[in-house]
Amino acid sequence: MISLNNKHILLGVSGSIAAYKSAELVRRLKDAGADVRVALTKGGAEFITPLTFQALSGNPVHTNLLDTEAEAAMGHIALARWADAILVAPASANFIARLAQGRADDLLGAICLATDSTIAIAPAMNQQMWANTATQENLQQLRQRGILQFGPGEGDQACGETGPGRMLEANQLAAHTANIFETGLLSGRTVLLIAGPTQEAIDPVRYLSNHSSGKMGYAIAQAAAEAGAKVILISGPTALATPPRVERINVRSAQQMFDTVMQHVANSDIFISTAAVADYRPINIAQQKIKKTKDTLTLELQRNPDILAAVAALKNAPFTVGFAAETESLEQHAQEKLERKGVDMIAANLVGEGIAFEADENALLVLTAENKQQLATASKFMLGRQLINIIAKQHHI
Ligand SMILES: Cc1cc2nc3c(=O)[nH]c(=O)nc-3n(C[C@H](O)[C@H](O)[C@H](O)COP(=O)(O)O)c2cc1C
């Protein structure tokens, strides 16, 4: 079963008779968990209507570049940033030529120029058009630029001829698209991750906790699994679904999280601490619900174990990555945390009202002893993948 869980796929549809297969493709991509937006070229819209794609994708369809309303809703730059990957299927000979020239005179061309995400094309055309030197030279240029090519297949063609140029089937294209995210960068490695808040009991019905949603940690867990790692996610209480191929262990308190980490850390190559672990817990947990009798109530708290520092201090410590959530002086606090806790890497982000904790987007400053890197505001899934790429590089040094 292929997975495109939480992926933003921009499907470009250009002017080929194979465009009818793209309707099925939207279904397959969505079945795999993707959020799909469709950009239709002028030629594409002659073969299949925007209405079909709007109904199937559940999103508005994008057709015009020089249209004030469309640009205001979600313009070409916004679409280029939104996409985790762009799949042009079918890619007509004419569109392939435009892409090779780097033209931005239509919406899909402009999006492809403005993105730094992976672009894949699924060519579809008559076998003579396919064999033409112009087409082959254009394709060679695209491959050299890192643009992926899915297919084409061979066989009977709509024009009555037989040969190469048939667009691959929808299920094949969906599987190839899912493979874009399977980097294998961490295959054979075990990643231990902690995520979400902890709950520190006050009495049988109340607890101390924080605003952590767990979204960043779950996104990193997903990216690590896609990079081929075995992933163990030790999670505080969250409302999130477990990412595919991730083993999740639920805990509540910081102490439980600490104990569970210590059970699994010896077999881990990489430890990533994204959890918002409570620093303190009530010393006494009332056996019964505390009654509202007094005007003031004092809770005495004691320090919880520092999970990150404890892992970093282990004799055979894994490559250890901490998170720093700060409300001010981000770099300074992150640098201090890197040194104080003796970790290999710190990913720092600003938190506060409406920033980071419950949001779907974030920005990260990634520090190691040797260098620093700013990851610009993006979806937590995109940042998760970027962070896993950095960790994989550092870990293999
Ligand atoms: C019936 C018909 C079928 C066509 N099928 C294809 C095709 O499969 N592949 C292709 O590259 N061009 C095909 N063409 C030509 C393109 O539609 C034409 O080059 C168009 O300008 C491409 O539009 P685009 O640049 O927006 O993709 C076909 C044209 C017609 C009339």
Image: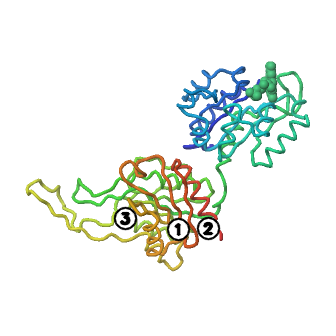
In-front residue for pair 253/344: 344
Q: Is residue 210 above or below residue 56?
A: below
Q: Which residue is mark 2?
A: 394
Name which residue type carries label 3. Gln
Q: Is residue 259 left or right of residue 79?
A: left
In-front residue for pair 105/94: 105
Q: Which mark is residue 256?
A: 3
Q: Tell me, yes or no, whether the two marked residues, 1 and 2, touch with CB atoms within 8 Å.
A: yes
Q: Is residue 131 above or below residue 338?
A: above
Name which residue type carries label 1. Met
Q: Which residue is mark 1?
A: 345
Give the quarter of the figure containing the C terminus. Answer: bottom right
Q: Tell me, yes or no, whether the two marked residues, 3 and 1, touch with CB atoms within 8 Å.
A: no
Q: Image quadrant of residue 130?
A: top right
Q: Is residue 147 above or below residue 13?
A: below
Q: Is residue 18 visible?
A: no
Query: Mark 3 Cα within 10 Å, few/some/many (few <14, many 20+)?
Result: some
How far from the left and from the top, in percent, is residue 44?
71, 25
Name which residue type carries label 2. Gln
Label 3 vs label 2, nearer the camera: 2
Which structural element holds mark 1?
strand
Residue at x 38%, y 54% (from the top left corner):
212
